[in-house]
Amino acid sequence: MLTHNGTTTIETERLILRRFEYSDDDSMLRNWIADEKIQKMYSEPVYSTKAEVKELLDKYIGSYERNDYYRWAVIEKTSGECIGQIAYFLVDNKNHFAEIEYCIGSEYQCKGYATEATKSVIAFGFEKINLHKVQICTKTINAPSKRVIEKCGFNYEGTLRDYFFMDGKYVGRLYFSILRSEYKPDLD
């Protein structure tokens, strides 16, 4: 049985994962949500105006009323900037698993932020929600994301071939997971 407690703040060495706030709009636009390359890899639309971001934030913030809703703004401690997001966008109460999605702005990639955020959300899932399995997927063309997934200890499950049609060609979808019995807390 899952123990839902909603999106609560998680602090890591360099990041604060917290609920989105309306005041995040400027740094969201500056750092990731208006970036076509980031949003395409994340399979999300580009948001280019404060009004569009407000609509999205209305959805996120309104959903925090549900105790089984988990979506965090990724805040870099030193700058206070919202550099991306991470979520359990799919929570399966019957089968006790959840799936992570994340995105980090281009300027902040390859610095370990995605790995740091993902490891903390995996720990939250097993230790706070009592998940049996955490899963994640990425596109076959997204090598940096695949490296993050591997660093977080996920096991490869399989590929859905030609899952996405992007820029005139087909791209596969790679699936990975960690079972509770395989989870090892990051003790460093």
Image (spheres, grey):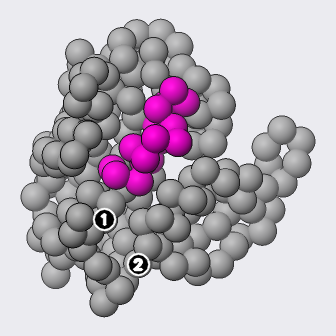
- Residue 178 locus on image (x, y percent): 41, 78
- Residue 161 locus on image (x, y percent): 78, 68
Single out the residue that lies furthest toward the front: 188
Which contiguous range is marked in magenta? 102-117
Residue 16: say if magenta: no
- Is 177 rendered above or below residue 166? below
- Tell which of 90 and 18 is nearer to you: 18
- Is 5 rendered above or below residue 103? below
User: Which picture quadrant has residue 139?
Assistant: bottom right
Q: What residue do we see at 52% from left, 67% from top? A: 150
Q: Secondary structure at mark 2?
A: strand
User: Which picture quadrant has residue 119?
Assistant: bottom left
**Residue type (three-letter) at the residue carrying disc 1:** Ile
**Marks 2/1: CA distance?**
9 Å
Single out the residue that lies furthest toward the right: 168
- Tell which of 61 and 167 is nearer to you: 167
Residue 116: say if magenta: yes
Q: Which mark is residue 11?
A: none
Label 1 crowding class (10 Å Cα cut-off): few <14, some 14-19, many 20+? many
Left or right position of 1 against 167: left
Q: What residue do we see at 39% from left, 44% from top? A: 113
Does the CB distance between marks 2 and 1 fall below 8 Å?
yes
- Is 156 rendered above or below residue 78? below
Left or right position of 22 against 87: left
Dot placed on the residue nearer the N-terminal end, 2 or 1? 1
Q: What residue do we see at 10% from left, 58% from top? A: 5
Q: Secondary structure at mark 1?
A: helix
**Residue type (three-letter) at the residue carrying disc 2:** Ile
- Tell which of 57 and 107 is nearer to you: 107
Q: Which mark is residue 122?
A: 1
Query: Is there any visible trace of residue 87 in the rendered image?
Result: no
Location of mark 2 (residue) = 178
